[in-house]
Image (tube, coloured by chain):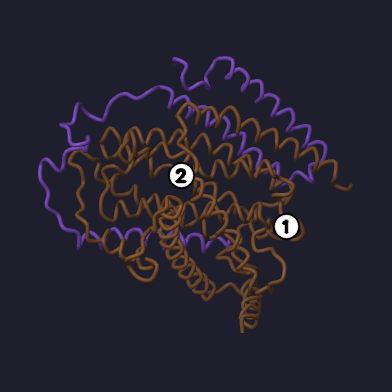
Chain colours: A purple, B brown
Amino acid sequence: MREYLPVLMFIIVGIGFAGVTLGVSQFIVPRRSSAKKMAPYECGVEPVGTARQRVEIKFYLVAVLFILFDIEAVFLYPWAVAFRRLGLYGLIEMVLFVAVLLVGYLYLLQKKALDWNSPS
Amino acid sequence: MKRLLADALQKYHVWAAEHPDPTFAIWAFIKIFIILNVTLVVVSYLVWAERKICGRMQGRFGPNRVGWFGLLQPWADVVKLFFKEEFVPGSANKVLYSIAPALAIVPALISFSIVPFGPGLHVTDLNVGLLLFLAMSSIGVYAVTLGGWASNNKYALIGGLRSSAQMISYELAMGISTIGVLLLAGSLSMVDIVKAQEHTWFVAFQPVAFLMFMITAFAETNRTPFDLPEAESELVAGFHTEYSSMKFGLFFLGEYSNVITICSIAVTLFLGGWNGPWLPQSLKFLWFFAKLAVLVFVFVWARWTLPRFRYDQLMDLGWKVLLPVSIANVMLTAVVVYMRVPR
């Protein structure tokens, strides 16, 4: 576990760097605030409505698909590292796994889930 | 002198591995401090180099007033950013708004803890090194998404949404394209991966994976031609529209550190890391930096060569080309490795 200590230290130093940079700037930046300045920027025009609106469902779909395929990627890492020891068994196992995923992928293609311009 | 130093370092490593003690932590802290400083200087000069190169590509001089060849320009910029007025939009979510810039820079810096710059020149050699890099690049998505959402500005929100969808889509292809290298090296440790390339760089066996890694690297760092999250011509500045002063500065620094990080990883995985002819062991890190400089130049070059993608083209490329090709590449590599392994 010893080799993880420097990573922890690096995280602390990194957060410290960001914190000090932001903290120091708090003391020296000028602040002359006004109601107009605090309004959201919309190219100088009066802001219309709010930014807390509904967003396209497609972004959600992308997130769900990402989880599915990312799990595959996570499964591939240990397999790739141990591949030489697994031999033919490992190869066949992964071919089957990818084949199952391929069927799902083709289904997605056929449903046009990956077409950004198709109506969702 | 350098050889003596390297030998002492090597002896210390051997000794420290057998005797865990507080000096190990102090030594690690010194290395972290040096790497952090070198990184920040390199990042600020990358900004200078980019402005200089793009100036030349457009028939301008680029920055040339502050110091010799404009070499003091980055420092002038930092001082300027520190003294700029800072304001938080009234309707913003204050906490997330302040955390987002830190999230942009910290993961990019932490990734350097696993990059082997030269023989023995690394902060730590994790047996899951590559996973740490992938985890950190995933956290980087939060900076842009939270920054865009917390600003409570429509441009920022659209920029943040676009970038989150783009980065997670391309992260898949990036993660899977590195698996070909893992199959060849049989290890996730960055040092082992570099050592496995002593004779032949992995780019020779994995040209497709290298190409895909570089394409996804452009998307992960939000650089042209995939800079839709901050498409100036339609979204003002995208996710950092409402950021000013040093908060903007950290986003800016984060983007450029990400370029350096991802190029370092590409050099390590595909271009042989510190491996190269002629130089003695203690100077091998120069090879690493030379390769890094070439890749970074490609990033700058592409910015002034390629136009921006349309969003549907971007998604098509990620999901319909890069993802299937990267999986096919992994399977093909697996079959070839299986047939070549003596048993």
| Amino acid type at mark 1 | Gln
Q: Name the residue tied to disc 2.
A: B223
Secondary structure under the numbered disc 2 in the rendered image: loop
The correct choice, above or below, for B174 with respect to A108 in the image is: below
Question: Horizontal placement of B91 versus B146: left or right?
Answer: left
Question: Between B289 and A22, which is closer to the camera in this rendering?
Answer: B289
The correct choice, above or below, for B62 with respect to B158 in the image is: below
Q: CA distance from mark 1 to mark 2?
A: 29 Å
Q: Are marks 1 and 2 on the same chain?
A: yes
Question: Between B260 and B92, which is closer to the camera in this rendering?
Answer: B260
Q: Position of residue B1 (x, y in %)?
A: 61, 84
Quadrant in the picture for residue B277: bottom right
Question: Between B23 and A14, which is closer to the camera in this rendering?
Answer: A14
Identify the residue at image location x=52%, y=19%. Answer: A113
Q: Position of residue A38 (x, y in %)?
A: 16, 42
| Amino acid type at mark 2 | Arg
Identify the residue at image location x=32%, y=67%. Answer: B66
Q: Name the residue tied to disc 1.
A: B197
Residue at the limit of the structure toward the right, as seen here: B343
Identify the residue at image location x=28%, y=32%. Answer: B154
